[in-house]
Amino acid sequence: MQRRTLISIFVAAMLALTSMSIYADQGRGGGKAGDRDQQTARDQDENRAKGHGKDETRDRDMNRDEDRLQTQGSMSVSDKDIYGSELMSPEERNRYREQLQQMRSEEERLQFQTQHREKMDARAKALELEVDDAE
C-alpha cells in the first residue's frame, strides 16, 4: 500500500510540474504555436527579401555611392592613396588633398587625378624612376 501511495504522489508531482512548465511557456509567449508563428514571420520576411533582393542591392549600392561622394570631401586621403606620393613633398601632398576635397563632382575628381597621374609619370620619367601604383 505504501508503494502505491509513493507512486501516486510521484505521478501527481510530475503532472503538476509538467502543467507548470506548459503554463510558464504560454505566459512568455513560448510554446510550439508561438515558435511556429515566429518561424512563419521569418520565412515571409525571407521570401520578401528574395523577391526584392536585386532592387534592394541596386538601391543600397547607389545610396552607398552617393554617401561616399557626399562625404568624400570631408574624408582624408592618406599618402598611400595618392598616386606618386613618394615623389611629392609633404606640402604637395597636403595641397593635393585640399584640392581633391574642394572638388564637387566625381567627374572633377577623376579629371584632377588623371592630370596628377600624368604629372607624376612625367616627374618619374625625368628622374628615371617608376611610380608605385597606389590607386
Image: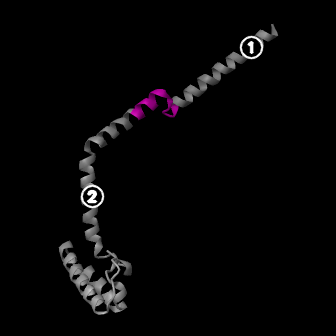
Q: Which residues are magenta?
A: 27-39
Instruction: Give the spatial CA distance, label 2 vs label 1.
Output: 68 Å
Give the answer, above or below, for where 63 lies relative to 100: above
Badge 2, how many Cα within 10 Å: few under 14, some, many 20+? few
Q: Circles 2 and 1: CB distance less than 8 Å?
A: no
Residue 77: x and y in percent read 34, 78
Numbered tag placed on residue 93 in the rendering: none
The residue lying at 67 percent from left, 20 percent from top is 14
Direction front: furthest residue: 128
Q: Secondary structure at mark 1?
A: helix
Q: Nearer the viewer, residue 56 or 8?
A: 56
56 w.r.t. 66: above or below: above
Q: Nearer the viewer, mark 2 or mark 1?
A: 2
| Kind of residue at badge 1 | Ile
Q: Measuring from the top left, give residue 101's x and y in whole percent.
A: 27, 79
Near mark 1 (Cα within 10 A), the count class, few <14, some 14-19 or many ≥20, is few
Which residue has dot 2 on it? 61
Q: Is residue 34 magenta?
A: yes
x then y, percent, for residue 10: 72, 18
Compared across the picture, whether 2 is left or right of 81 comes to right
* Amino acid of disc 2: Asp
The mark found on residue 7 in the picture is 1
Does 13 lie within the magenta span?
Answer: no
* Rendered position, 133 above or below 93: above
